[in-house]
Image (cartoon, rainbow, N blue to C red):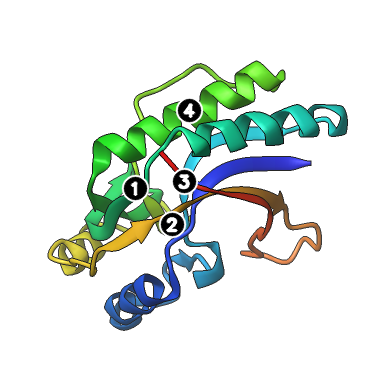
Amino acid sequence: MRLFAAVLPPEAAVAELREAVRPLRDDRLTWAAEAAWHFTLAFMGEVRDDVLPELHTRLARAAHHTAPFTLRLHGSGHFGERALWTGAAGDLPALRMLAERADAAARRAGVPMDQHRRYTPHVTLARSHDASTHLRPYLEALAGFEGTPWQVGTLSLVRSHLPVSGVPREQPRYETVGSWPLEG
């Protein structure tokens, strides 16, 4: 199954972001469903079933060694002209540490991981599939966005169900398959 470790924003944070994004929604971008808004900590790709028990054990250990921390949705950013996102503010060192621990847990469980890169916390909001669509107006509109802080208390393991219908702009569906409390 296709998996990633994540921090899922609470409904109150999602509601704030929904209101900030509402006036920006148009057909020039493919907007991610609100249920898909998350901070990916470690993308694992396809994970064999026989690895899952060890992965769960190691993610539980990573959560056990991480104290709850404060985070908020913040500002905007982009990857090239393809992806629009909102970032994070708050205890970013704790978020980065949790991402490193989730990555290490996957590696130690036997999941072949991509080369480690500097972690950029973000929630993907929309994607452009047309090179003529510029993200600057969206970036400017969201630049001042500041969400209300919340306490991150859970590390989640999420399964990604990729689109299979062939319908243009169909989006993946996400399912939480494991979660562990941060205990520090």
Q: Residue furthest left?
A: 144
Residue 36 is situated, as x and y percent measured from the top left of the image, at 54, 62
Which numbered disc covers residue 21? none
Q: CA distance from mark 3 to mark 1?
A: 35 Å
Which numbered disc covers residue 128? 2
Disc 2, SS: loop
Query: What amino acid does circle 4 point to?
Result: Arg
Disc 1, SS: loop
Residue at the location (53% across, 26% down)?
103
Q: Residues within 10 Å of mark 4 (few under 14, many from 20)?
A: many
Residue at the location (62% across, 19% down)?
107
Q: Earlier in the sequence, mark 2 or mark 3?
A: 2
Residue 143 is situated, as x and y percent measured from the top left of the image, at 15, 61
Asked if the residue under mark 1 is in contact with the one under mark 2, i.e. CB atoms within 8 Å, the reply is yes
Asked if the residue under mark 1 is in contact with the one under mark 4, i.e. CB atoms within 8 Å, the reply is no
Residue at the location (70% across, 36% down)?
56
Residue 140 is situated, as x and y percent measured from the top left of the image, at 15, 63
The residue indicated by pointer 1 is 81
Query: What amino acid does circle 3 point to?
Result: Leu
Residue 169 is situated, as x and y percent measured from the top left of the image, at 61, 64
| Numbered disc in front, either 4 or 1 | 4
- The quadrant in which residue 119 appears is top left
Q: CA distance from mark 4 to mark 1?
A: 30 Å
| Numbered disc in front, either 2 or 3 | 3
Q: Earlier in the sequence, mark 3 or mark 4?
A: 4
Q: Earlier in the sequence, mark 3 or mark 1?
A: 1
The answer to whether one can see residue 177 in this image is: yes
Q: CA distance from mark 2 to mark 3?
A: 35 Å
Q: CA distance from mark 2 to mark 4?
A: 32 Å
- The quadrant in which residue 24 appears is bottom left
Which numbered disc covers residue 101? 4
The residue indicated by pointer 3 is 182
